[in-house]
Structures are given as structure tokens and as C-alpha cells.
Amino acid sequence: MNQEKPLIYNLRLDLAFAGSKLLPWPYNGPIAIEEMGITGKKEYFLIDNWCYTGSIVIDGFDNKKEELNTSVVFDFDIYKIIRQFIKNPTNRKKIHTLADTEFSTLYT
């Protein structure tokens, strides 16, 4: 239609999608996000490259229950939740980096 110069149109398009660009994964490997309940129950949410890969629950008696995803799929909504959580400085002490060997043993 040539109602707008291509350069202006492309800049507007870039601006419109600027907020939805994916950031690079800020860790060298997978992480576990720790949440603790008042009863002593701990839950670890396992995240790798912006993808939720499962959770591990340890109750007050050290019983462990694992729910691990065998097929991990990227989800943009989960990405936004994780990005906001990681960005908050008060959450940093809840984030534990996992060595590759430590992470792979969770799946065996």
C-alpha cells in the first residue's frame, strides 16, 4: 500500500515485539528453585534453559517424591514467570545451580 516507509514500518514492528524477545539463559546449566512450607516440606522446581523440567518434594520426614517431565517443551508463559522470579533480588537465595552430573542423576 506504500502508506508508510518500510524503515518506519520495520522500526514500529521491532518496537511492538521488543518486550517479547527471549533473553539468553543466565546460568551455566540447570537450576532448582527452592520453596519451603511451614511444616518443613521443601519443594524444588527444576528449570533448564527457561523450561520447567519437574519438581522434587521432600517432606518433614525426608521422604522424597519426584515428578520429572520426560518431554520438556518451551512455554512462553512459563518463561515470563521464571524471568520475573529470577529478576527479583529477594529470590536469589532460593535459586540453586545444579551441576550437569547432579541434574542428570535426577532422571536416573
Image: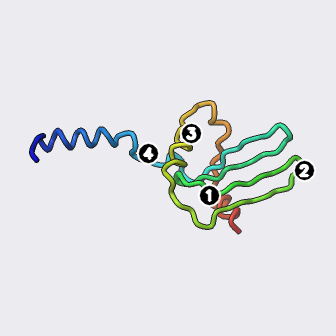
Q: Which mark is residue 23?
A: 4
Q: Residue at x 56, y 54 (%)?
A: 29
Q: CA distance from mark 1 to mark 2?
A: 25 Å
Residue farthest toward the top in the current orientation of the protein: 90
Q: Which mark is residue 61?
A: 2
Q: CA distance from mark 3 to mark 4?
A: 12 Å
Q: CA distance from mark 1 to mark 4?
A: 19 Å
Q: Is residue 34 above or below residue 30?
A: above
The earlier-in-sequence mark between 3 and 1 is: 1
Marks 1,2: beta carbons within 8 A? no
Q: CA distance from mark 2 to mark 3?
A: 29 Å
Residue farthest toward the left in the current orientation of the protein: 2
The earlier-in-sequence mark between 1 and 4 is: 4
Look at mark 3 in the image and give the residue it sits on: 86
Look at mark 1 in the image and give the residue it sits on: 53
Q: Amino acid at mark 3?
A: Ile
Residue 24 percent location from the top left of the image: 45, 48
Q: Residue at x 53, y 51 (%)?
A: 50
- Given residues 105 and 6, the one toward you in this image is 6
Q: Quadrant of residue 72?
A: bottom right
The earlier-in-sequence mark between 3 and 4 is: 4
Give the structural element (helix, strand or loop) at label 2.
loop
Q: CA distance from mark 3 to mark 1?
A: 16 Å
